[in-house]
Amino acid sequence: MSLGALIAKSRTDARLTVEELSKLTNIPATLLRDMENNNFAKCGGETYARGHLRNIATKVGIDERILLDLFETEVTAPAKPIRELLNENNVTMPYQEPKRISWKILAAGSAAALILFAGAQIFFLDSENGAELELITTASATPSEPAAETLTPSSAASPEITGGVNIELVASRGATWLYATNEDGKVLFSGMIRKGNSKNFIQSEQVNLRVGNAGGVDISVNGENVGSVGANGEVVNLTYNAD
């Protein structure tokens, strides 16, 4: 479902006409119709477009993150380099130019290493009566203290997680947008899932889902298929608990 189609569907689900939504949001009706037709060129720029989407989401009762994610995916994403998109989704660290080491520093380090090596050679050559050998023999004859036992991660007992809920969503019949949170409201995922792809969520207590194309997906709970959760294009809210 496209961003414009989702705006139109959310408006009709809220039992509002374009004119009524225009009065609630102070957005011209002509601009609302353009947005519902996926035309955001007259919004006055990306910043104003995002503001309109937040305003619309509030009035029709939909999470603004869903509209904003679709806006980034469908409208602004093609104009952004892939590294910037990855940074926005915390997939990779922001790119930084590699620091170049000055050749002067390298030369100074090499010279210092040569000086230390030469000094060590002179020390060993000038030693008298095998004093170095005696020192080494004495040191090796001294019994060393046993190393303290350390508990390695492999030997440490890891707590077993009992119960919980394991949700797998597969976009088997069509693409969908998905918004997933846990019992504390922490966002587990927000974005598009293309046809043929899947998402898996494992939580100890609860998983909440908002699915934008319920008829295009299959959902399994703890390995058991729950069957159809809605029709094509239907927006549904689902909650699965550990019990």
Image (tube, rainbow, N blue to C red):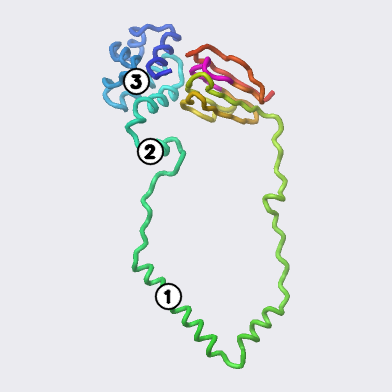
Residue sitting at x 30%, y 15%:
34
Residue sitting at x 61%, y 86%:
132
Amino acid, disc 1: Ala
Residue with the most extreme bottom position: 129
Amino acid, disc 3: His
Instruction: Say whether residue 213 is magenta.
Output: yes
Above or below, 191 against 97 in this view is: above
What range of the chain is rendered magenta?
Answer: 209-218
Q: Position of residue 217 (x, y in %)?
A: 54, 19
Mark 3 residue crowding within 10 angstroms, few (<14) / some (14–19) / many (20+): some
Above or below, 105 against 30 in this view is: below
Residue sitting at x 52%, y 11%:
231
Depth check, front residue: 197 or 221: 197
Q: Earlier in the sequence, mark 2 or mark 3?
A: 3
Cα distance between the residues tagged 2 and 1: 43 Å
Q: Which residue is mark 3?
A: 52
Amino acid, disc 2: Glu
Q: Which residue is mark 1?
A: 112
Q: Is residue 35 left or right of residue 181?
A: left
